[in-house]
Amino acid sequence: MLRNALGKTFRFLGYTVQYGCIAHCAFEYLGGIVVCSGPSMEPTIQNSDIVFSENLSRHFYCIRKGDIVIVKSPNDPKSNICKRVIGLEGDKVCTSNPSDFLKSHSYVPKGHVWLEGDNLRNSTDSRCYGPVPYGLIRGRICLKV
């Protein structure tokens, strides 16, 4: 009787670990559903919009200018942000705000991207914290639900 109960318990634990590993790999390498919050990407993505993020493009270095990406926040590593890729490594980008009279430019260093929100007047982005390391990119948004 005890042997039967232990056998069922270990079998259950084995299946739990297996399915947990499969789920982890799916969310880490394939993608997942993300709820975006904040006004920085308006009007493209509204507050509380649900999007699907695919993660394969970051592993294969297929992120392009104009893509909207989910990134670990450089200011708060516990949170993610949603921004548009404006510049890739080696690109010259405008580093000043749209309202500034004198424009300043900079080059994006190797291994980094320049990110900005679509709502430039209400976005904390690379204009505030500088270029973002490519390794902080979690995924690319490919579908808005």
Image (cartoon, rainbow, N blue to C red):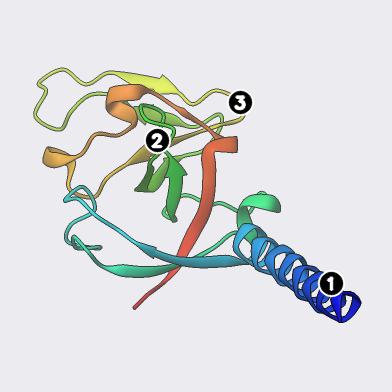
Q: Amino acid at mark 3?
A: Lys
Position of residue 37 relative to residue 98, above or below, is below
How far apart marks 2 and 3 lie (CA) works out to 19 Å
Position of residue 55 relative to residue 96, above or below, is below
- In the rendered image, residue 22, in percent from the top left (x then y), is placed at 72, 69
Seen at 27% across and 18% down, the residue is 104
- In the rendered image, residue 35, in percent from the top left (x then y), is placed at 33, 63
| Mark 1–mark 2 CB contact (< 8 Å) | no
Q: Quadrant of the N terminus?
A: bottom right
**SS class of the residue under badge 1?**
helix
Ranked by sequence position, the earlier of labels 1 and 2 is 1
* Left or right of residue 56, residue 18 in this image: right
| Mark 2–mark 3 CB contact (< 8 Å) | no
Mark closer to the observer (3, 1): 1
- In terms of image quadrants, where is residue 92? top left
- In the rendered image, residue 93, in percent from the top left (x then y), is placed at 38, 30
How far apart marks 3 and 1 lie (CA) works out to 55 Å
Seen at 85% across and 75% down, the residue is 2
**SS class of the residue under badge 3?**
loop
Q: Amino acid at mark 2?
A: Ser
- Please give the residue where the numbered disc 1 appears in the rendered image: 6
Mark closer to the observer (2, 3): 2
How far apart marks 1 and 2 lie (CA) works out to 45 Å
- Please give the residue where the numbered disc 3 appears in the rendered image: 110
Q: Amino acid at mark 1?
A: Leu
- Please give the residue where the numbered disc 2 appears in the rendered image: 73
* Left or right of residue 44, residue 121 in this image: left
| Mark 3–mark 1 CB contact (< 8 Å) | no
